[in-house]
Image: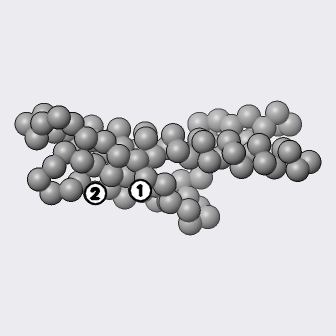
Amino acid sequence: MTGSTFRLTNADIDALIHDEAYHVFPGTTVTVCCLTTKNGFSVIGESACLSLNNFDREIGQKIARENAREKLWALEGYAVKTIRNQQ
């Protein structure tokens, strides 16, 4: 969070992340990413593709992580707005 405008940056969101874990459900193309923040809160993102023949684990993990990270943007935006309204 920078300055008095409460602007969030990519660096702010990345700084929240403490750990990440991935799971691919056996026999499927479903990939789940769990991002754990430094305060212990976790968010998940998911991805899937149409066919096992087209499944690429790295692409699935990348998309699932992006989806989880987007959730952090929303949560952090809410938190910043709450703090700003209390001042």
Q: Position of residue 32 (x, y in %)?
A: 33, 52
Which of pointers 2 and 1 lies earlier in the amino acid sequence?
A: 2
Label 2 environment density (alpha carbons within 10 Å; few <14, some 14–19, many ≥20): some
Determine the CA span between mark 2 and mark 1. Answer: 9 Å
Q: Residue at x 69, y 45 (%)?
A: 78
Q: Is residue 5 left or right of residue 1?
A: right
| Residue 43 image point, x, y percent | 48, 54
List the single residue furthest toward the left: 53
Q: Amino acid at mark 1?
A: Cys
Q: Which mark is residue 34?
A: 1
The image quarter containing residue 73 is: top right
Residue in the image at 16% along x and 39% along y:
55
Report the residue marked by disc 2. Answer: 23
Q: Secondary structure at mark 1?
A: strand
85 horizontally vs 33: left or right? right
Q: Is residue 45 visible?
A: yes
Q: Quadrant of the N terminus?
A: top right
Q: Residue at 37%, 52% (x, y): give it.
A: 33
Left or right of 84 on screen, residue 61: left
Question: What is the x, y in percent for residue 5?
Answer: 82, 33
Residue found at the very far right of the displayed protein: 87
Q: Residue furthest bottom?
A: 40
Question: Label 1 near label 2: C-beta < 8 Å?
Answer: yes
- Please, what is the three-letter code of the amino acid marked with disc 2? His
Query: Position of 82 compared to 57: left or right?
Result: right
Question: For the point 28% across and 57% down, which residue is it?
Answer: 23
